[in-house]
Image (cartoon, grey):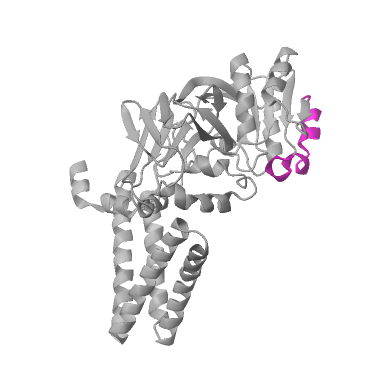
């Protein structure tokens, strides 16, 4: 059995195990009494409904929904235990766990194409590095990045403030003084600003993973746990990559630009202090379309009116990632990734966010994207930074415009995680699909 034939059989095994688990639960409940079976069904429905309500509502109703979502499975376990059904429950839970494991094997994407080309390069003579000591909870000080970089011959400037510092201008001045490498230890937004200067002057960029999430560093295959390892690119054992650079309204980005629901969350004053809480707070109105400007997406001949959210990324993310929190297989395709989400109701929107359905999703790639609106300006989240830009907003890509210097010895890009989808499992398991493939 070759690799291409393995996935359908794993999908069939996952579905068989899931069906056996369901039959086991139904049989166990029905063997005691019909009322017990009905209670189990009600508990499952209550759990699902409470989860939806937690995302779609706010205030005391959200709190009540959370209490129900937490209490329902606990009450179900207690009920089954009192009726001597705990052992069958554990057996069925084991079947469901095995089904999930088999499903993940079935849905695991194949190996990515060959990685981005690398070129061996000599060490820089005059490296210049900007470091944000507040970024990533103080990683610059925790990993002693300034002293280590200076020991390798780099000029280091700390963004200590309190005044606002023009990072791009600092980088331009450094190039004018003879810097032949620009480095950044900070968040993706700061890295994007310096990356634009590096691309304009054709000098390499050094990315130091000192931010909170380090999405750009992830897709470059850098070590996100220990940012000091990125400094090895200043030495002899370094290679250079040529990657694309995104542009939106004249500003560069290395990850993505988000419009609509996510952009409004980023714009909220409390976003940096508590991203999860802020997103949950604005989610109900945004998903139902009660707030925010009306958007219109125009990409490669496709027009989408009134999407709730649009994500434009510098190269496409793996399919199934509607929030841009995953990874990109390559950064040199010369294409923008575009994902648009349109939901007619909050319930459908929650289903989209959970990955339960793909209806209402447009996913494509293009060299250029235009976002227009009924408002003269709209909020945009650019690499996690909140910016207000005039409409229409034009996004484009500069193919292979950025030289990035990385250590030859680095962790590499991690494999993509499978995106769970019962619909995809059914498609993989279909015997008619296997027959047509021959």
Q: Position of residue 294 (x, y in %)?
A: 41, 37
Can residue 28 be seen here? The reply is: no
Residue 394, quarter of picture:
top left
Magenta range is 134-154
Q: Position of residue 166 (x, y in %)?
A: 70, 25
Q: Position of residue 306 (x, y in %)?
A: 37, 38
Asked if the magenta segment contains residue 219, the reply would be: no
Q: Position of residue 99 (x, y in %)?
A: 37, 62
Of helix, strand and loop, which mostly describes the magenta segment? helix
Q: Number of callouts in the render?
A: 0
**Residue under the image location 31 percent in, 46 percent down:** 359
Asked if the magenta segment contains residue 147, the reply would be: yes
Residue 437, quarter of picture:
top left
Can residue 302 be seen here? The reply is: yes
Residue 221, quarter of picture:
top right
In the image, 11 versus 311, the foreground residue is 311
**Residue under the image location 51 percent in, 39 percent down:** 263
Q: Is residue 185 left or right of residue 265?
A: right
**Residue under the image location 42 percent in, 29 percent down:** 371
88 to 188, vertically: above or below: below
Placement of the C terminus among the 4 image quadrants: top left
Q: Is residue 274 left or right of residue 98?
A: right
Q: Is residue 8 left or right of residue 48?
A: left
200 to 377, vertically: above or below: above
């Amino acid at each position: 059995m070759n690799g291409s034939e393995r996935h359908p059989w794993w999908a069939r095994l996952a579905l068989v195990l899931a069906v056996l688990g369901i039959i086991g639960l139904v049989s166990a409940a029905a063997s005691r009494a019909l009322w017990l079976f009905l209670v189990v069904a009600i508990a499952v429905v209550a759990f699902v409904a409470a989860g939806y309500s937690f995302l779609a509502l706010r205030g005391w109703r959200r709190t009540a929904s959370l209490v129900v979502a937490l209490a329902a499975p606990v009450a179900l376990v207690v009920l089954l235990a009192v009726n001597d059904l705990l052992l069958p429950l554990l057996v069925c839970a084991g079947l469901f766990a095995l089904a999930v494991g088999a499903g993940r094997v079935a849905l695991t994407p194949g190996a990515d194409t060959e990685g981005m080309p690398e070129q061996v390069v000599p060490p820089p003579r005059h490296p210049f590095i900007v470091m944000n000591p507040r970024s990533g909870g103080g990683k610059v000080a925790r990993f002693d990045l300034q002293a280590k970089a200076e020991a390798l011959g780099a000029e280091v400037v700390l963004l200590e403030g309190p005044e606002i510092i023009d990072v791009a201008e600092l980088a331009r001045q450094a190039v004018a003084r003879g810097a032949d490498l620009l480095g950044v230890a900070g968040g993706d937004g700061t890295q994007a600003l310096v990356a634009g200067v590096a691309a304009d002057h054709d000098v390499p960029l050094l990315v130091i993973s000192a931010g909170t999430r380090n999405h750009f560093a992830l897709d470059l295959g850098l070590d996100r746990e220990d940012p000091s390892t990125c400094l090895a690119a200043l030495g002899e054992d370094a290679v250079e990559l040529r990657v694309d650079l995104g542009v939106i309204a004249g500003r560069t980005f290395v990850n993505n630009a988000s419009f609509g629901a996510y952009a409004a969350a980023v714009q909220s004053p409390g976003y940096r202090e508590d991203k999860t809480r802020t997103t949950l707070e604005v989610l109900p109105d945004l998903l139902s379309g009660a707030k925010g400007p009306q958007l219109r997406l125009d990409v490669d001949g496709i027009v989408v009116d009134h999407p709730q959210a649009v994500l434009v990324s510098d190269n496409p993310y793996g399919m199934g990632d509607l929030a841009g929190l995953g990874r990109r297989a390559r950064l040199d395709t010369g294409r923008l990734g575009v994902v648009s989400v349109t939901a007619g109701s909050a319930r459908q929107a929650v289903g989209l966010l959970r990955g339960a359905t793909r209806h209402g999703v447009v996913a494509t790639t293009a060299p250029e994207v235009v976002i227009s609106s009924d408002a003269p300006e709209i909020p945009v989240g650019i690499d996690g930074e909140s910016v207000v830009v005039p409409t229409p907003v034009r996004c484009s890509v500069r193919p292979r415009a950025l030289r990035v210097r990385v250590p030859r010895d680095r962790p590499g890009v991690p494999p993509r995680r499978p995106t769970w989808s019962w619909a995809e499992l059914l498609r993989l398991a279909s015997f008619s699909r296997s027959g047509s493939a021959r």
